[in-house]
Each structure stands twice: as structure tokens, then as C-alpha cells.
Image (spheres, rainbow, N blue to C red):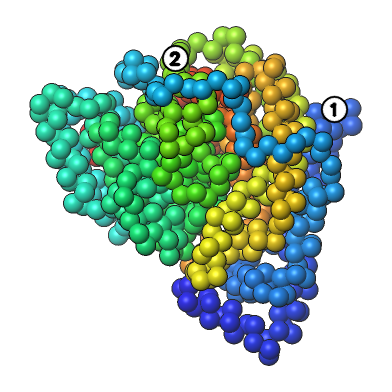
Amino acid sequence: MASKCFFQIHRFYQPDHFQSAFAFAKSLKTAIFIPMKTAKKNKTDGANDIYDLQSIRAPRLVGRALRTFTALLEGPTGRLIFPKLFRDAGITALREQHFEEPPGFYPDWTTGSSAKNENVPAKELPRKKFSRPPGFQMPTIYDYHDAFKKGKTTPSKVAENLLNAIKDSEQSSPALNAFISYSEEQILQQAAAADTRYKEGNPLSLLDGVPVAIKDEMDLCPYPTRVGTAFLGESLPTQDATTVARLRTAGALLIGKSNMHEIGIGVTGLNSNHGTARNPYNPGHYPGGSSSGSATSVAAGFCPVALGADGGGSVRIPAAFCGLFGLKPTFGRISEYGAAPLAWSVSNIGPIAGSANDAAYAYGIIAGADPGDPHTLHQPSPTLKGWDKTNLKGLKIGIFTPWFKHANDEVVKCSEEMVKTLENLGVEFIDITIPELEASRVAHIVTISSEMSQALDQYYAQHGHKHGLDVRINLALARRLTNRDYIKAQRVRTRVMENFRRVFENVDVILTPTTAIPAPQIRNDVLPDGESDLVKLNQITRFAGFANFTGLPAISFPAGYTSNGLPVGVQAMGPAWSESLLLRLALAAEASVKRQKPQVYYSLLDVE
């Protein structure tokens, strides 16, 4: 497919076609990022006056229009289009603003103290099975461990069930496409070793023999790290990423490399190279991205927990779309060593899990200082102390009402029901305002796209045409940003971090929906080339990128379902190093949501 796209672009830019290209450019003069006013503001309402995020309206591009537009941006005609694109995207407005603050190249919340070289204390890791509400229940890490320990099943039997389930999911129509690469031999070898440890009464941890999927953004021996592309990963890694190594040390049965939105630059899960992962709650819908395969794996029952990576919501968004728990930690809390260097100042590795308990356990295993990642060495030591205390009396949660309600009606309804639930658990809700969200949104886009573009620059000339069309559009835009844009964005970061710091002087947590819409449908005209749908992108990311830009932790947890059975998630964002508090909130909320079974689900473990 990549060679076909290249051929079409080559033909398009022959002299005979240049005039039609110019005409097409003119016809697309309103194609991208046309701001649309938000709901009418009550001028007496101070919160509405401060809220400045806007919806957008823009045509959706697929097929020939998408291919042509991609070619225009990458070729000489692009210079005619970029000024309007940047103006409508808010980049021009950001260029015209002035910020006194010095640039903050990393979201550093440290106070100068260095962390001890330790992980979460073993005594703080979850050790019990929590009571859960009626409804569908995914087996937890504890359920697997208990079944192995009591001899009800073995890791090898689970591994066989897993391999059969993956093969069945690949042969179904549509295929789930949860994995890019896995090895039957590797899976069975790990399971056999776990069998021996259980027989000898020496499991390495509760995770021993329990399946875990790894996003194709982290090194996992012996698999290539393709980052969802068609050309990266020619050389195999010689060691696991730090997070993967810690899971392996705990005995986790590492399944393989889960699918992802190519290079992590999108949030639906679209991948034209390895197939688009599907949402187990409805395979006709996206699972969310970029950690799409990780969320699909957990929701489909392949594993109770998976690793994702989050540069702009890529753990939390798929967790929300697939009815799961997704934790983005404080910047530097979890080592990035061995992860693809795509977005240095905004990326975070985090768990996606079927329960709050499993999210907490996985976090406890992988968090902590690592000499391979200097950012992990200057933080307080990680802890889970008190995370399982579900009495929320005295907890103060802030809501910025116009932001909270800037979402699909069903998403708002589920989110408001969660507010009522938390109120009944003793939470005090406080009205807050957060200024300059629009500047933060644009500055985050400038930051992540600039960093991704530079990270891939060495491959662009030879391999750029092999990317999917949506990736090529994003990279073409990113390559037109300047060093001045990037520095300006980092000055905005300093300002925005201070804005959030002030909010957290009065509240413990900020609550929003995770996304403004439930999982979108994968329309028939999308595959195989993909689509450009900026309205949908804006809706999916409306609440997510601020935690990445500021480096603050955030968690998505289930809040309910739409009328057609699609999951809805809410997001809780806290001050630096408050992961245990966010997990505590998610655990308390979990008991209130009656979970529904996905349309596609494989039972590897029969648990009563």
C-alpha cells in the first residue's frame, strides 16, 4: 500500500497535474480547523467567560480526497495551504501572544530532593480481592494467582487458551487486530517456567504466570519495536525496556507486542500497516489510541492488564472507550528507558487494566527510580499507601463546569451520575476555573508534534511515504513549525503549570469526562487508507492533553454506558505524585458501576 501511495503522489506532481492540484488546494480553503463558537455564554457567569476551548467544524477527508490533500501538503503547493491551517488551528494566535515566563522544557515538579533507588514497597502492593458490584466481571490478577496456587488451572493451560483465543480473534470478521507480533514458542516457554515455580511453591509474585500485553512502543525481547510502522524495528532489541524487565522479574507472562496507532500520533487506533484494532464492546467501533491493542487485549479477555504509553491521552482514551482503567502517572514516575523516543517531554508509560486493583498492582511493579532515566531520580519515592481506603469523606474535587459539560449528551449524563455517586461517598465538589486552556491545548500540540517530527526526521526522506496518510498529514504540518513555536509553547507550559498549581491549592482532584464522545464508528470508507476527521479528533482529546503538558497524573475509570452499550469514562487529574489518591478514587467509584460484557470476549480462566 505504501508503494501505491508513493506512485500516486509521484504522478500527481507531474507538470500535467499541477494545475489541478492548485485548483484542489483552493477548493479546500475551508477544509481544516474552522473554529466554531461554543454554546452561548452567560456574561454574568465568570466560569463561562474564562472558558476558551472551542469546538471546531471541518470536512472529513477519505479516499481520493485524503490522498490528494496529503500530496498537496507534502509538495510545493503546501505553502499555499499552511498559513490558513495554522491560523485556524490556533498556532497563529499563539505566535501573536506574549508570555513573560521562561520556557519549561520538562514538566518538572521536583523540589530538589532525590528519590531513593527503590520501587513501591512490596507491603503496599494490593494483596486481596476486593468486593465488586454485580454485573460482568473480568478476572483479576488475584483471580489468576489464586487459581494457579489452588491447582484449579495452570499457566500453561491459560497460555494454550490464550493462543487459541488470539488465533480465533484474528480469523473473525472483522479481526480484532490486537497484536502486531507474538510467538507461540515464547508464550509456552514462559508458562512452563511459571508452572514449575507454582509446583515448587515459589511464585515470584501475584503476577507470576499472568498474561500481560506490551504496547509496540516498548522494547520486549525478542520482538522488533516497530512503533506501529512498516519500516522501523529492523534491529531486534538486546534488552527489555525497564518497565518490561520489572514485569518479567515479577513472572508476568509477556504475550507480545500489542497494536497501536502508528507512531502514537493519533487517538482512534487506526493503523493501515498492521490492521486497525477493534473495540471488543463493538468491533465496528474504534478502541481508542494510541495504545489501541493494549486496551483491546484487556477488554477481550486476553489479559487482565497491559502496558500503554500516553503522550496526549493514549492510555486514558482507549481505557475509556473500552470500559477499563487507565493510569497516566506523574512525569518521570515510571521509567521511559527502552521506550521509543517519540515525545520526550510529554510521554508517560502506564497500565491499562480491567480493575482498579490491577491498575494499582501493575503501577506498583513498574514505578520507581531507574538510573537509565534521569527524570525518575529526582522525585519522592513512589507509594501506594492508603490507596485502598474507599471512604472518601473530606476529599475535595473541583469541576470547571463549562469544560465538564463540553461533551456529548450521553457522556455528560454518565459523568454527572458519577458525580452523584462520589457525593454519596463523602466527596465535596467545588466549582473551579482554569484559565488559558486554549493556549495550553495549542502549545501541547506544538510540543508533541515537534518532538515526534524531530524524532523521526532521520527516516523521513527515505521512509516518510510509508506512513499512513493521516500520519503523513500530521508530520507535514509538524515539519512547518519553527523553533520559535516550540520555545513559545514551553513558555506557555510554565504558565499553565502555575495555573494548575493554584487550582490544587483548593482542591485535591479535578474531574472531567475522559473524552467528549464515546468510541466512534469505523466507517466503511475508512479502510484501508484511513481518514482525516478533525472534528472527531478534537472531541476525543478535549480533556486529555493537559495532564501530559503539565506532567500531572491522571486516571480514567468507567462511569457507565451509552444507550447502545458503548463505555463512558471519567478522568480524575491530581497534583504531582498523587497516583495513590487517584487509584483510591477509582477503586471507590468501581463499586458503583454495573459492568457490561463486551460483544467479543474470551474466557481464559473460569472464575466463580
Relative image position of residue 600 (x, y in whole percent): 36, 47
Task: Name the mark on residue 381.
Answer: none
The answer to which of 307 and 460 lies nearer the viewer is 460
The residue at which mark 2 appears reads as: 385
At a point 46% along the width and 40% down the height, the residue shown is: 336
Relative image position of residue 41 (x, y in whole percent): 84, 36
The answer to which of 220 and 173 lies nearer the viewer is 220
- Camera sees residue 364: yes
Q: Amino acid at mark 1?
A: Asp
Q: Residues within 10 Å of mark 1 (few under 14, many from 20)?
A: few
Is 156 displayed left or right of 104 in the figure?
Answer: left
> Comparing marks 2 and 1, which lies closer to the viewer?
2
Relative image position of residue 220 (x, y in whole percent): 33, 47
Q: Count up the numbered dots.
A: 2
The residue at which mark 1 appears reads as: 45
Is 496 displayed left or right of 376 in the figure?
Answer: right
Specify the quadrant that holds the C terminus: top left
At a point 28% along the width and 52% down the height, the residue shown is: 222
At a point 31% along the width and 53% down the height, the residue shown is: 223
Mark 2 and mark 1: span between their CA atoms? 40 Å
Q: Amino acid at mark 2?
A: Lys
Where 526 falls versus 188 (above or below)? below
Circles 2, 1 touching at the beta carbon (< 8 Å): no
- Camera sees residue 303: no
The image quadrant of residue 191 is top left
The mark nearer the N terminus, 2 or 1, is 1
Dot 1 falls on a residue whose secondary structure is loop
Dot 2 falls on a residue whose secondary structure is loop
The answer to which of 144 and 39 lies nearer the viewer is 144
